[in-house]
């Protein structure tokens, strides 16, 4: 008997039926699903201090449970003293069981630790069924030890779904448990 993440099981048992009832899908394959979650972090100060990239990679690895990679600049920007190929951020792409585990920890443990939390804004959709969420402080994650943090910084979380419209994607993410603000 193998382990199945809680949210994955809930998606199969409850969310598919709820979305089929709401949108009238004829086939189970039409029901939108979460394809991947990308957690990225830009470290602009890494131009001056190269160790900041290593800290960012270590933090993302601790938060997600999967090894993060550093990202490099695509072109030269003279105003920022940036050269093509310099490390400038970190990212990790989550799929499968690790993705569902991260989403579960985000919803149940991390988002409630945000100061004055009243839900996440529903205006982060891109028109193609993907949702972007900005986190302002990495210390909301229980995996981060506050005493070892060099600098408080934020990160971007992108939820990539197979939904065709923003309405379908919002229903999917809402059924999975993301706490959207009531308008």
Image (tube, rainbow, N blue to C red):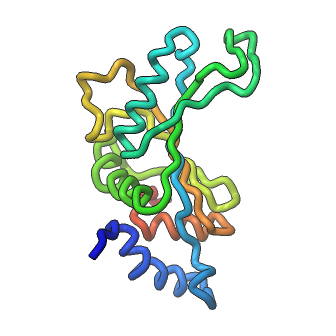
How many numbered discs, if any?
Answer: 0
Image coordinates for residue 134, horizontal then vertical, percent? 50, 41
Kindly indicate the quadrant of the structure image that contains residue 165: bottom right
Q: Residue at x 33, y 70 (%)?
A: 4
Kindly indicate the quadrant of the structure image that contains residue 44: top right
Q: Residue at x 25, y 30 (%)?
A: 145
Image coordinates for residue 136, horizontal then vertical, percent? 44, 34
Residue 79 in view, yes or no: yes
Query: Which is nearer the eye, 1 or 181?
Result: 1
Q: Is residue 54 placed above or below 9 in the rendered structure?
A: above
Q: Residue at x 35, y 48 (%)?
A: 111
Q: Residue at x 54, y 85 (%)?
A: 20
Q: Is residue 10 placed above or below 181 in the rendered structure?
A: below
Image coordinates for residue 82, horizontal then vertical, percent? 68, 14
Q: Is residue 176 placed above or below 22 in the rendered structure?
A: above
Q: Is residue 130 placed above or below 15 in the rendered structure?
A: above
């Amino acid at each position: 008997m193998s382990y199945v993440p809680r949210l994955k099981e809930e998606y199969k048992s409850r969310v598919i039926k709820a979305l089929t009832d709401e949108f009238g899908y004829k086939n189970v394959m039409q029901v939108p699903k979460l394809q991947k979650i990308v957690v990225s972090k830009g470290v602009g100060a890494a131009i001056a201090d190269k160790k900041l990239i290593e800290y960012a990679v270590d933090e993302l690895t601790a938060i997600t449970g999967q090894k993060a990679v550093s990202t490099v600049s695509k072109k030269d920007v003279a105003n920022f003293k940036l050269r093509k190929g310099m490390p400038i951020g970190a990212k990790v792409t989550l799929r499968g069981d690790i993705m569902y585990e991260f989403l579960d920890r985000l919803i149940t443990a991390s988002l409630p630790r945000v100061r004055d939390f009243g839900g996440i804004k529903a205006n982060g959709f891109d028109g193609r069924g993907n949702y972007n969420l900005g986190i302002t402080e990495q210390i909301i994650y229980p995996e981060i030890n506050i005493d070892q943090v060099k600098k408080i910084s934020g990160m971007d979380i992108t939820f990539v779904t197979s939904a065709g419209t923003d309405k379908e994607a919002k229903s999917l993410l809402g059924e999975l448990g993301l706490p959207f603000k009531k308008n």
